[in-house]
Amino acid sequence: MQASPHGTIGERYFPALRQRNFRLFWLGQCVSLAGTWMQNVGQSWLVLEMTGSAGKLAVVSAVQFLPMMLLSLFAGPFIDRFPKKRTILFTQSALAILALALAILTWTGVVRYWMVLVMAFLLGMVQLIDNPTRQAYVIELSGREHLMNAVSLNSAAFNLARILGPAVAGVLIELVGIPPCYFLNALSFVAVIVALLFVKTPPLAAGKPVSSVKDVLESVKDGLGYIGRRGEIALPLALLAVISLFVINYNVFVPTFARLSLGRTASGYGFMMTAMGIGSFVAAMALAVRSKKGPSALRLYGGAVGACLAIIACGLQRNYILTCVLLGITGFCTISFSASTNATIQLSSDDEHRGRVMSAFSLVFGGVTPIGALYAGAVCEAAGPAFTMILSGAIGLVAALAAVMYRRSAHRRERDLSPAA
């Protein structure tokens, strides 16, 4: 049947899904990410049950993201060098094995806090390669024309999983315990692995060989120089670094706020994370629908400001329903900011440097988590989760407003220096 002049809803709003390769990968991700969120909730609640300490929960989060903090920039040259599909198949298989190992440790009752730390570190080592490789692979699956749509749909899948995963995990924990969360996550990786086996992407030209430490260091230096010369990449990354460091510490202060400030159980915490996921999913779908217009500076910087204001408001009250609403707003604004940043820097990057640019993105988005988690855990222990949310939101708000003013100033300088028409 011939499509209408304007096309079907799918053709108009979700053109990336018309690309067979992206569609297969995206469907596999939808299943796998739900399992990942179940494990995230299970891990956080397991640590709180074993220790009752926000500080020790923060240490787990810090250990998991430590490899990304220390090694992200050095992963970029290898991501640019090797076929991304083969790399992702390896990393997804490794993540499945780690989830199964944690499931067995918890199910048999032998799990101890130090074991959770070891598993978190190993998980972080695999994610060091997996996260930026999947980000950089999207443009090969969808094409440059549909990149913004593909990034938005990936965010939609991530946050649909955030809606379902924590809610299911919270109920499972109360009914049958924590181990099923890990078993189901291990099983969920089968979906994305099978999907990747059916994906067919033409091989890109190999990047510069990295056969020595000197080659790696030169490649990292080249990548950082490339980012520094392009303000449209450097400024969003700098703002993302501050927001990630101080504001996006949800794995620390949301469960502690749920337990200590609101007196909620695992299911209550799970539904709080689900509320955040709903807001994030709505934002991702809104970005996908409007993706033809490309990344928007308003959604990028406005999202950062909105997330900070919502998290401040959350810390100022103690009503469970209002908390869920505010977390939903936080999720909406966070995804508007992070997805717009992702698309902006990818579209501003050339193919030769994209792996290194996305490694820098992974560094400032997740790699700063160890510092941010330790900061959040220490402030939570000293002054409580509510104060931590207010302080963190205020710091992020100042940074976002400073970035907006710097961007406007830079644009004025460009206009003043440009020759008259």
Image (cartoon, rainbow, N blue to C red):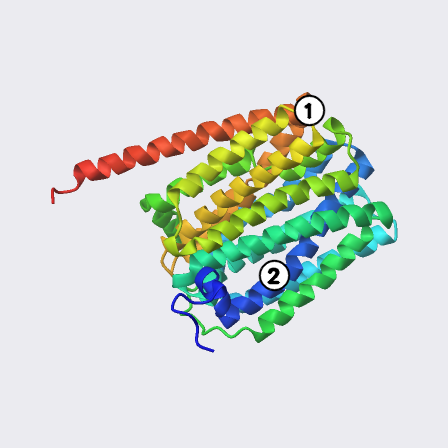
Percent position of residue 342, x then y: 46, 50
In the displayed image of the protein, which residue is found farthest to the bottom? 1
State the separation of the CA atoms marked 1 and 2. 36 Å
Residue at 35% x, 45% y: name it. Answer: 232
Q: Nearer the viewer, residue 251 or 358?
A: 251
Q: Nearer the viewer, mark 1 or mark 2?
A: 2
Residue sitting at 57 percent across and 69 percent down?
Answer: 24
* Residue in front for this viewpoint, 287 or 342: 287
Q: Where is 374 relative to 46, above or below?
A: above
Tell me the crowding category of disc 1: few under 14, some 14 to 19, or many 20 or more residues within 10 angstroms, Cα based. many
Q: What residue type is disc 2 on?
A: Gln
Above or below, comparing residue 192 to residue 131 in the picture: below
Residue 162 vs 259, above or below: the answer is: below
Q: Secondary structure at mark 2?
A: helix
Label 1: which secondary element: loop
Whether residue 220 is visible: no
Q: Earlier in the sequence, mark 1 or mark 2?
A: 2
| Left or right: 18, with 370 as reference point | left
Q: Which residue does the numbered mark 1 point to in the structure image?
A: 384
In the picture, measured across the screen, residue 11 lies left or right of residue 126, that is: left
Residue at the extreme left: 420
> In the image, residue 49 lies at what x, y percent?
81, 38
Left or right of 251 in this view: 290: left
Residue 56 horizontal side relative to residue 82, left or right: right
Which amino acid type is shown beneath numbered disc 1? Gly
Name the residue rendered at 44%, 56% in the picture: 148
Q: Residues within 10 Å of mark 2 (few under 14, many from 20)?
A: many
Give the residue number, with chain letter if any, for mark 2: 29
Q: Position of residue 261 (x, y in %)?
A: 73, 27
The answer to whether residue 298 shows anywhere in this view is yes
